[in-house]
Amino acid sequence: MILLNVMTGSKESTLIYTGYLENYYFQTKSTEQDYIVLTQVTRRNLRKQALTEQPLGEGGTTSAYSNEPGIPVYLPEDVIVIPAR
């Protein structure tokens, strides 16, 4: 059994998925990984909540995020597919 922690990110959130590796796949005729399949997965948001909105230059704002990670949420699906990109 191989336990993986997989971090994914976007502008809205940074998530960490923890689960057991079920399988992994490569792109056709390539050595580049295409996606992985995890089972018994939990998901945790690493940016739990915005703490403050601060002014940023000409009418913009920025958010400061807590260092507290979110609470792990068990995902009831049998498998979760995470693309490599």
Image (spheres, grey):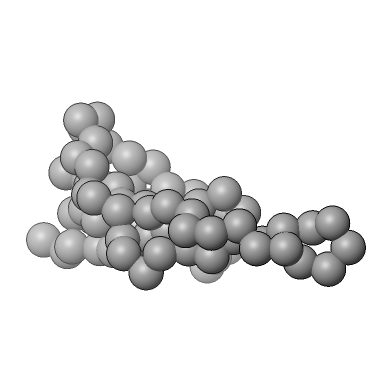
At x 33%, y 40%, the residue is 80
Q: Residue at x 42, y 52 (%)?
A: 49
Q: Quadrant of residue 18?
A: bottom left
Q: Which of 24 and 76 lies nearest the eye of the viewer?
A: 76
Q: Position of residue 9 (x, y in %)?
A: 52, 58
The answer to whether residue 63 is visible is yes
Which one is nearer the viewer's eye here, 41 or 55? 55
Where does the image place residue 32, in percent across and percent down from the top left? 54, 65
Tell me if residue 23 can be seen: no
> Across the whole image, how many numbered discs are drawn on residues?
0
Q: Tell me the residue at 57%/49% (across/down).
A: 12
Q: Looking at the picture, does residue 44 appear above or below residue 64?
A: above
Quadrant containing the N terminus is bottom left
Picture residue at 24% right of the left edge, 30% below the top: 77
Does 51 appear above or below 76?
Answer: below
Specify the quadrant that holds the C terminus: bottom right
Residue 4 placement (x, y as % from top left)? 25, 63
In the rendered structure, the answer to whether residue 53 lies left or right of residue 25 reads right
Between 70 and 80, the one nearer to me in the picture: 70
